[in-house]
Amino acid sequence: MRFDFTTIPDRHGHDAIAVDGLGDGTGFSPAAPKKGFDSIPLWVADMSFATAPSVTRAIHERVNHPFFGYYEASDAYYQAIIEWHRTRKGIDELRPEHIGYENGVLGGVVSALNVLCSRGDNVLVHSPTYVGFTAVAEANGYHLIHSPLVLDEAGIWRMDLEDMERRIVNDHIHAVIFCSPHNPCGRVWERAELEQAMELFERHQVWVISDEIWSDLLLDGHTHIPTQSVSPWAHDHTVAFYAPSKTFNLAGLIGSYGIAYDPWLCDRINKEQSLTHYNAQNVLSMHALIGAYSEEGAAWTDELCQVLSANAALAHKRLNGYPGVSCAQPEGTYVLLADCRQWCDEHGVSYADFPRLGWDVGVTWHDGRLFACSGFVRIAVSVPHAQVEEALDRLDRYVF
């Protein structure tokens, strides 16, 4: 490999929530481990890998020009996004006028909801549900209606179209927050699945807000299909949000973008995004994206996906080897969702108390209750392979 994904970094004292943000386990963060154990950060969805060299080089080159006054997004910024979507996602029609800026994908979700819904509206989501969707929707006056994903006989998470339609009709739903690839289940939706979902949404005139931030993190050769590409209706009734932050570990720099092709939808969302007068990217964030969405950044991403595929395969095999634990094979993202309910029931451990068994020994996985799936844990395997092995060895010795 050209790039180093084996070094285990010391992140303490470098502002990293993953290691410095551990608390007592009563809120969003896991509890800190007991004395004698270091923390292996498998909870918050960022990575323990240094970003691509092309990113840091682009930032350094911009910092060497010490002028940081007002600016506008450059042609190079838009062209980097356009070329990335052309070469990585097969999209040839993207133009600068289709691209809108948002400080974060969740902010984009709220902007889209404010355009497409009225406060107090019901909004469809799939459960297990990304905790960020729950937080921003409820904080802004929307009610989430959960349609549970179901495991088929092959252990693959699937959408329940009948349940989705029933909830759309009964709860008068006009918008859905769609996650593709899905966090925390790790599904990369197949074209047929997307087509069926979009046909359902078209039948009931449901607008689609598609979070596609994970679309570059694909495991074992899976292919992401942009939601807007599956039908003419999806093309004009979907706003999709992306960012380099998940792929390149850049969440601290701030910056995402939305894509909408319908002129009315694009204009209305851009207007909504402008109303705070504080929704503007950092100039270093812009140059970081340009460095990320480069030929070298693409090569780095390809190698990263190989590393994550190996990590996910190991975790999937080992977790499914524990009696009373089951875990679907993720196809994208770097998160796995392990169902530990049977183990808890057999050992008299409450679903609320179970996550702490890992936290105590430094395996800082995430409590599934935050994702509307009590008795599960979400595990981010975005650390060097040796740390995944060590975390699983601790689970062997101290938990299972």
Image (cartoon, rainbow, N blue to C red):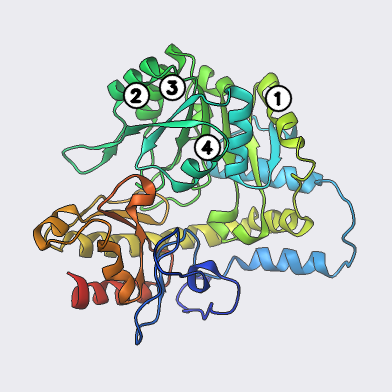
First-in-chain label (2 vs 3)? 2
Mark whose residue sits in front, 2 or 4: 4
User: Between disc 1 and disc 3, whose residue precedes?
Assistant: 3
**Residue drawn where x is 21% and y is 76% of the image:** 398
Within 10 Å of disc 3 (Cα), the crowding (few <14, some 14-19, many 20+) is many
Report which residue position mark 2 lands on: 164
Q: Amino acid at mark 3?
A: Met
| Left or right, 50 with reference to 325 | right
On the image, which quarter does residue 277 sit in?
top right
Name the residue: 25% across, 62% down: 354
Give how far apart the Cα atoms at labels 1 and 2 are: 27 Å
Kindly identify which residue carries mark 3.
Answer: 198
Above or below, 266 relative to 279:
above
Q: Residue 252, position in %: x, y? A: 63, 61
Which of marks 4 and 2 precedes in the sequence? 4
- What's the distance in space between the residues labelled 3 and 4, CA to CA? 22 Å
Where is the C terminus found, in terms of image quarters?
bottom left
